[in-house]
Amino acid sequence: MRKIICTLTALFCLSMAAQAQTFQAGIKGGLSSSNVTLTDLQNDPMQYTKAENVTGYHAGAFARLQILGILLQPEFILATSGGKVEVTDNTSSTSVHVQKFRFDRIDVPLLLGYNFFKVARVQAGPVASNLITAKQESRNVKEFFAGSDWGYQAGLGVDIGNLTLDVRYENINRKYTNTVQQSGGKVRNEQFLVSLGLKLIK
C-alpha cells in the first residue's frame, strides 16, 4: 500500500510540475545607452576620461523555460555599443580631443530569474560576448582585443499578453593589448538597455 501511495504521489507531483512548466520563445529588439572607461593603462602616453554615452541598438531572439515561477532565459543578440572618451596627451596637457569607441558584438546572455504574479520579472546572469568589430574613431582595433569576453546583466521585465518589456544594466570588461606599442589596459563597457519583445511561442 505504501508503494502505491508513493507512486500515486510521485505521479501527482509530476503532473503538477508539467502543468506549472511553460516554454516560451520569441524575438526582441531595442536601444541602449553605453559608455566606455579605460583603466590600468600601461605604456600609453595618453590619458582617457569618460566623456559621454552613445546610443546603440540590439536585436535577436530569446527562449524562456519557467517552472513554478523560476525561469531560465537564454538569448542570442546582435548588439552595438561603445562610448566617447576625452583623450589628453601627457606631454602636452593642452591637447585634448574626443574619440569614439564602437563595438559590434554577438551576445549570449543566460539569465536566471523569478516571475511575480505572471507579469513582472527580475533576472540576472552571465553574458558571453563575442566581438565582431571594434573601432576607435575610424581605426580598426579589433586585433587588440580578445575575440570573446564575459560580463553580466541584471534587470526587470514585464509581460503583457504576447509582448515583453525589459530594462537592464550590462557590464562587460575587455582586455586591451597593443603588442606593437607594447601598451595595454582594460576597457569597461557599461550600458543600459531597453528592449521590446514579441512571443512567437507561448
Image (cartoon, rainbow, N blue to C red):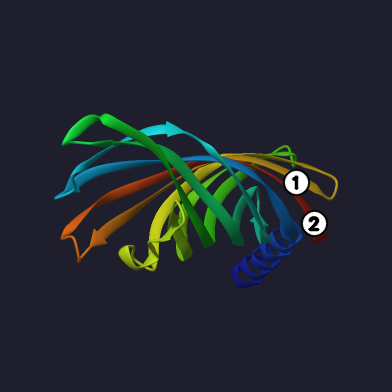
Q: Position of residue 3 (x, y in %)?
A: 60, 72
Residue 44 appears in the figure:
yes
Measured as percent of width and height from the top left, residue 129 is found at: 46, 61
Pick the quarter of the image with the N terminus.
bottom right
- Residue ID for mark 2: 199
Quadrant for residue 178, please give it: bottom left
Residue 64, compared with residue 69, is above or below; it is below
Residue drawn at point x = 39 percent, y = 68 percent? 147
Nearer the observer, 5 or 194: 194
Relative to 186, say whether 180 is above or below. Answer: below
Disc 2: CA contacts within 10 A as few (<14), some (14-19) or many (>=20): some
Instruction: Pick whichever, 6 or 155, lies toward us.
Output: 155
Q: Earlier in the sequence, mark 1 or mark 2?
A: 1
Which numbered circle lies on residue 164?
1
Secondary structure at numbered mark 2: strand
Residue at figure coordinates x 73%, y 37% from the top left: 117
- Can you give x and y, in whole percent of width and height, for residue 41 in the image? 20, 46
**Residue furthest toward the right?**
161
Q: Residue at point 45% right, 51% down? A: 137
Instruction: Please identify the quadrant where the C terminus is shown.
Output: bottom right
Label 1–label 2 contact, CB within 8 A: yes
Nearer the observer, 155 or 107: 107
Give residue 145's mark. none
SS at circle 1: strand
What amino acid type is highlighted by mark number 1?
Thr
Residue type, numbered disc 2: Lys
The residue positioned farthest toward the top in the image shown: 94
Residue in the image at 34% along x and 62% along y: 145
Q: Is residue 74 visible in the rendered structure shown here?
A: no
Mark 1 to mark 2 CA distance (whole Å):
8 Å
